[in-house]
Amino acid sequence: MRIGELARATGTKAETIRYYEREGILPAADRTDSNYRDYSTEHLQMLTFVRRARGLGFNMAQVRELLALSDHDEKPCQDVDQLVRQQLGDVERRIADLVSLREELNQMLHSCDADKIGECRIVESMARPIAR
């Protein structure tokens, strides 16, 4: 399949596919006689894997590691489990940060009952240094 077909099948921009190929994340595609890239089912599966891993928040180094691990069917799963635990911890920290941010914004919103910006406690609170 050509790059446009692969792009549509995976929801990936053609330039991203070329980038993944340059970076060695995807193996180089064969070329047709007309010098078009010719992607295989393996490319489709690998790119689907990369897109899913990226969608789950894994960075490119982790994606590379997951791809490398996926080439060893006989190995124990603990290395993959460790990467997923690490990612889950990162997600939980981001959720905690967002919950804290939501609470702070709600507090700011409920602390202001001014009619004019000059009397607005939200603007006033944003000008104060952050307490650490």
Image (cartoon, rainbow, N blue to C red):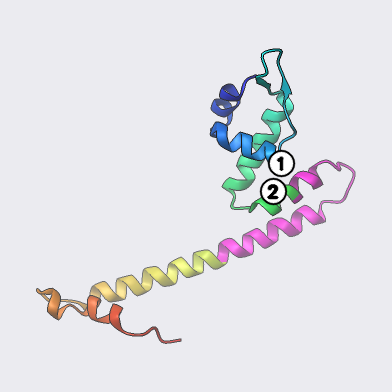
Q: Nearer the viewer, mark 2 or mark 1?
A: 1
Residue for point 67% across, 29% down? 44
Q: Which residue, given by chain and number where applicable, does mark 1 sit on?
A: 25
Amino acid carrying label 1: it is Ile
Q: What residue is at 24 percent from the left and 74 percent from the top?
A: 110
Q: Quadrant of residue 109?
A: bottom left
Q: Is residue 33 above or below residue 130?
A: above
Residue at the spot of label 2: 63
Magenta region includes residue 93: no
Q: Earlier in the sequence, mark 2 or mark 1?
A: 1
Image quarter (top left, top right, bottom left or bottom right) of the N terminus:
top right
Q: Looking at the image, do the residues carrying marks 2 and 1 touch, with CB atoms under 8 Å apart?
A: yes
Secondary element at tag 2: helix
Label annotation for residue 94: none
Q: Secondary structure at mark 1?
A: loop
Residue extending farthest right:
74
Measure how far apart labels 2 and 1 are at the Cα level: 8 Å
The quarter of the displayed image where residue 9 is located: top right
x then y, percent, for residue 125: 28, 81
Residue 26 at x, y percent in the picture: 71, 36
At 70% from the left and 53% from the top, the residue drawn is 62
Q: On screen, 79 above or below 115?
A: above
The spot of residue 11 in percent (x, y) is 53, 32
Q: Residue furthest top?
A: 33
* Residue 88 covered by magenta stretch: yes
Q: Nearer the viewer, residue 70 or 18?
A: 18
Q: Residues within 10 Å of mark 1 (few under 14, many from 20)?
A: many
| Position of residue 131 measured from the top left corner of the image (x, y, whole percent) | 41, 87
Q: Amino acid at mark 2?
A: Val
Q: Is residue 57 above or below residue 107?
A: above
Instruction: Report the magenta residues as a range.
Output: 65-92
